Amino acid sequence: MRPLDWAVMAVWLIYLISYGLYRARGSTSTHSFLLGGKTMPWYAVALSIMATQASAITFISTTGQSYVDGMRFVQFYFGLPLAMILISMTAVPIFHRANVYTAYEYLEKRFDRKTRYLVSLIFLFQRGLGAGIALYAPSVVLSVIMGWSEQATTIIMGVLVILFTTTGGVKAITWADVQQMMMILSGLALALVIAVAMLPGEVSLGDAVRLAGAAGRVNPVVTEFNWNDRYNLWSGLIGGMFLALAYFGTDQSQVQRYLTGRSIAQSRLSLIFNAAAKIPMQFFILFIGAMVFVFFVFRLPPVLFQPADLARAESKPGFTEVRQKFEAAHEARRQAAFHFLKAEGTDRDAFLGIYRGAQKELDSARKEAFALAGSSNDTNYIFLSFVTKYLPAGVVGLIVAVIFAAAMSTSSGEVNSLATVTIMDLYRAVRPQASDTHLLLASRLATVFWGAYAVAFASFGSRLGSLIEAVNIVGSLFYGGMLGVFVLAFYVKRATSNGAFLGVLAGEAAIFYCYWFTGISFLWYNVVGALTVILVAILLSRPDAAARRYSDA
């Protein structure tokens, strides 16, 4: 990066951290440190929820996902609006009125302590892994820009996250997220404008959309039903809804956000805002990836976007031939693109065939290069390659600062929620008479522990392929069981504590069976897990005991 980029990045990060800590002053009790004293306005909660999701993974991986696979990933979010409405109607008032710190605290009120402990432990395991993936993303940035070690970068980011979170708590995270979300949207819009502006003068935005569509990159809706296809209309509407219900209704990293709201109405508004804004935002991000694809139709991209993989491939015999094949395919695609845009009638169809054939040749050359490198995926490096090589000074620093701050925002929120569950669901059971001062100190120490845990797991990030898919696959291995037990708690009066406990275990077993022995899309894991929990719990529950327990909740 150039000096101006460093200056822009430093100023933004210093401002963001300082602003968050300033707004968090006075967080001297457990209630204020973990729940912000329940004083947050709806817009702050709404933007914090969005910023937590719009992590560095969103910038680094979602744009790259669109580059290689098109915009069909947006279907992943089609079930989210309905999920938000259902959660606003049910989970929000239930959790607020129960006056709980965590979602799992409610499970003890409804069932028993062992069910609370089981679900708490499931959350801690899966969210700890997710925090590690989120923390790994910035290391991809610096490895591309400056050639720094991914491990060293992860440790630096982990230390910053720990210091920020232990000092300011959830209020600092939330108010920093408000600023971060505004900068995220500004940075993305700027990247899109520059990508389109740098296309050849005779190529308009409409032309760029046609070229992306001709290559299968503008494909937001796939109506064909296929269990094994990760992203289609049906997996998005059904599986995506179940995943969103689990994420926003049972994952403490999100529940804790709307528990900070001033009232039930304020918390509901924050979720309804996300219901309306999430799909357009994701469509916008994926569209940027499609436009970056078109940009590289006219500019020669690297054979592999991951520098280390490219270096390994270049050292192997046969790479020269692969590079020549790649460059010939790129030139054929470029020429066919120009002719396709100018031609009419049958000529256009002919050039479309040449364009698509050249794209297949180019993809084939990339596969051969991956084989030489001993790798299979460079999705996480595509957008960063575009940013660092083609955007002007200052803008690069802004985009990198946004990515860094987004990673800090997501990781801080997740580490804070992990600390909350650790102390309120597990530690407080051991020390029920502990003072508020003691619990506040324990919460800060738990924050340090989970920050270190995230750093340790982040070292596996490079093995996970597309980060945006990896983080959702990890969540889907556990969310079905969590969702099922909360459906029982909220709606199934006859469910007993033993039935719920065994139902969760059965649900998780069903999910891992699907993962290991079938090829169905991970979005369906949430459906399978939740339905298994509910069915097993109902079959194992004794109605008389269930009725007594429900009346006590």
Image (tube, rainbow, N blue to C red):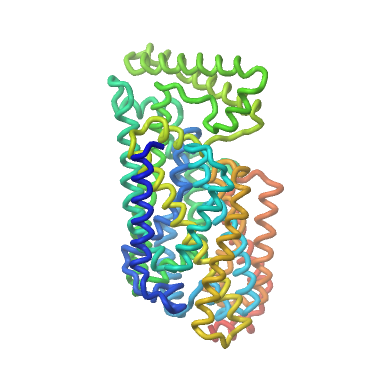
Is residue 298 rendered to the left or right of residue 69? Answer: left
- The mark tally for this picture is 0
Vertical order, 154 against 504 (above or below): above
**Res 287 seen here:** yes
Of 349 and 282, the residue lying toward us: 282
Is residue 232 rendered to the left or right of residue 294? Answer: right
Residue occupying the point 52% across, 42% down: 140
Residue occupying the point 43% across, 44% down: 59
Of 476 and 44, the residue lying toward us: 44
The answer to which quarter of the image holds residue 288 is top left
Q: Residue furthest bottom?
A: 433
Q: Quadrant of the N terminus?
A: top left
The answer to which quarter of the image holds residue 219 is top left
Estimate the x, y position of residue 121 in percent, counting from the top left. Answer: 63, 67
Estimate the x, y position of residue 318 in percent, counting from the top left. Answer: 65, 17
Q: Which residue lies furthest to the top in this view?
A: 347
Estimate the x, y position of residue 131 in percent, counting from the top left. Answer: 54, 56
Vertical order, 385 against 533 (above or below): above
Residue occupying the point 58% across, 79% down: 108
